Amino acid sequence: MAVGLHDFPNIPEIKGVRIGVAEAGIKKPNKKDLVVFELCEGASVTGVFTQNAFCAAPVRICQKHLGKSASRYLLINTGNANAGTGQLGLDDALRACQVLADQADTAIESILPFSTGVIGEPLPVDKIISAIPSALNNLSADNWYSAGVGIMTTDTLPKGSVRTFDFAGKQYTIAGVSKGAGMIRPNMATMLGYVFSDIAMSVDVLQSILKEVVNKSFNRITVDSDTSTNDSCIAVATGLAGNDEITSANEPLAQAFIQAFTEVMQELAHAIVRDGEGATKFVTVEVSGAAIEQDATKVAFEIAHSPLVKTALFASDPNWGRILAVVGRAGVEGLDVDAVQLHINGVEIARNGGLSPDYSEELGQAAMAPEEIHILVDLGVGNASDTVWTTDFSHEYVTINADYRT
Amino acid sequence: MAVGLHDFPNIPEIKGVRIGVAEAGIKKPNKKDLVVFELCEGASVTGVFTQNAFCAAPVRICQKHLGKSASRYLLINTGNANAGTGQLGLDDALRACQVLADQADTAIESILPFSTGVIGEPLPVDKIISAIPSALNNLSADNWYSAGVGIMTTDTLPKGSVRTFDFAGKQYTIAGVSKGAGMIRPNMATMLGYVFSDIAMSVDVLQSILKEVVNKSFNRITVDSDTSTNDSCIAVATGLAGNDEITSANEPLAQAFIQAFTEVMQELAHAIVRDGEGATKFVTVEVSGAAIEQDATKVAFEIAHSPLVKTALFASDPNWGRILAVVGRAGVEGLDVDAVQLHINGVEIARNGGLSPDYSEELGQAAMAPEEIHILVDLGVGNASDTVWTTDFSHEYVTINADYRT
């Protein structure tokens, strides 16, 4: 049921990155569920992680390892989140890291572990350990599609994005994969996102760029308002493109990178929404005319989370009163309801807090019919704005989440 | 599909209150959709209303009229919320008030109007005006069941509650009706709630008691997190029971009243949850051990709103990891995940941030099987607590809200 999700792109080699994929049988047999990214020595690696206090064991270890040592391997399993698993979860994740470190002849601190899947069940770590040699044996520079497939849980399609850009006679590539369909309301990062470039860039600059761009991509999507325990987004700059290492985000090359990087990050974030659990619509919620950006962000997320708005979207029903009701309850200080305007896919629906004189039910129904919906709320009091992307709420969502563990 | 909702009670006469009901044909023909409550002269009347900035036209008028004059009539229609209707909505509501005032030979300020139903469509005020004589013609002291039916929208059953108590040789009665099933996350009041007593009590005392009790009843229920534009809860003390007027909430009679009043208010609030759209479970979410009550309230509401928790409840699936994930993202300052404990229907599920050693999947499934679910989260850091009541999230909810206007 994914909405307007493009085929997985043809991703070229990114110098310094190799990918190995294996079937560990973690939740189901005959499914790619273990992915290893191998990074060259000297790569800049940074990440942002869930702010859920119940963050998963691998998230805690990642955060520790990132600061301690040069990262060389990302070890990702699906089928089990290793969250809510206490000390046993930490021990299990470290054991898998140690096995990979031994076989790759590196230190345990250079392994970054990631898990996604059911929360609260012990990690079947022996299955993972058994499959590590197989993943290492098929390390290759062109395993991107398999990587996209290998990190899926309730996703129906793999998600990838790639951009190349030229600068001063050199070509640079940025590519990544993401996964996620439910428990999507990232806060600092998404379920899992990995973006790689061959550019040379200091880890500090990469970190600052990642933090900024994540706030306009993964941190602005929501399927069901539930922030995961395992959200992780990793950015890697291998440094093999041949440029002098970027040490400031203000350099012209850094600016060119940010533009392409933002496109990749947004495409990966949007792909999660397009493949959101039970999604039949891809919905852009833009709030403009706010006094401050936080008001715009808050109103946009409240609209995106409202079960009544989401079920109306599912029904292609121009039930615009539900949208105004959300604006009214969102807690915007000094809201002037008479200044609020609402457009859906370019059709003016509401003006001055009431129905637009030009509105007709036919116009409203036509505006709500497409798969891609753009809701624009103008609060009419200032110049701040923000945009959030989300899905509708369908029977399929209930089916998926009522049956998830069976 | 209502969960454990008792039959409408046998409500005796409350001296000073008469009820008239009519069929105005507002949304559908042959349905009781207009209710008039007539109050005796001298009754204390107070109310609490939605905090949605897009509050409906009748809510604005109610708030204005309540302060201006002695209230004599409540005029309630279903089928149309008269919200998001701008100046026309105000004019329409006032026109209906004026017609009732003329026919009842009273001032327009003594009429309190209420509407509930679809948001954003013009009020069919002529239909209401045409039906007012019929409602006045059947004013009677025992029309309680008809009143419960006459204020329903997507409710499947009428909701009423009654308590009597004796004090110093006199008997007092408190009774009320409520409605609501969707767009339920009251903030100051519920969709519509009306509670009447024959007690004599100053309007100031009645107002302070209503505000306090609403925070432990209507303001602690949620079906779908959406605060309505029309929430109104009215309390009336007709003063015909014969006691000296209560002028302080500390009087012993006031304390006896508060106890019975709280029972009525909670029963009416719970009835809305039990009849929540698509509900198959009645869920009590209790959060204890919080540092401050606001933390307990916040965590309880976040659990009650989580689509993933609600779909797991629908499936009777002890997917406790989803509950802990909500606790972790709820934004409690200084949350100690290792101190958190979780019980469901008395079964210890989680301890020290992980699975309880005594837990088994069989125990979890047995705990989740009943229609009535009690989720207890102990944050383990303090003595503050709060309780919220909610429902699960079923296919029926999506069906009801995707088809609401058709």
Image: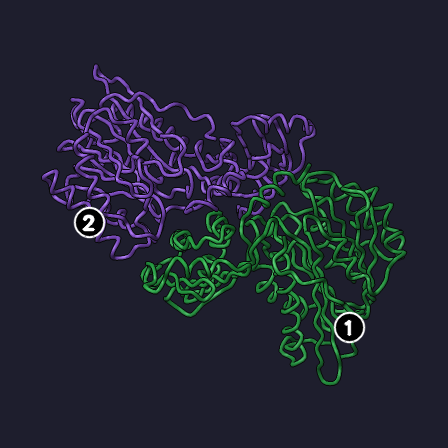
Chain colours: A green, B purple
Q: Residue at x 50, y 58 (%)?
A: A369
> Image quarter for residue B368?
top right
Vertical position of residue B246 compared to residue A121: above or below: above
Q: Nearer the viewer, residue A283 or A44?
A: A283
* A292 relative position to A6: left or right: left
Say which mark, if any, is on residue A239. Answer: 1
Q: Residue at x 51, y 63 (%)?
A: A387
Residue B291 visible in image: no
Q: Chain of mark 1?
A: A
Q: Residues within 10 Å of mark 1 (few under 14, many from 20)?
A: many
* A354 relative position to B370: left or right: left
Q: Chain of mark 2?
A: B
Say which mark, if any, is on residue B94. Answer: 2
For the residues bearing labels 1 and 2, Cβ distance under 8 angstroms: no
Q: Position of residue A39 (x, y in %)?
A: 81, 64
Q: Position of residue B59 (x, y in %)?
A: 27, 47
Vertical position of residue A394 compared to residue B366: above or below: below
Of the residues shown, which amino acid type is indicated by label 1? Gly
Q: Nearer the viewer, residue A127 or B115?
A: B115
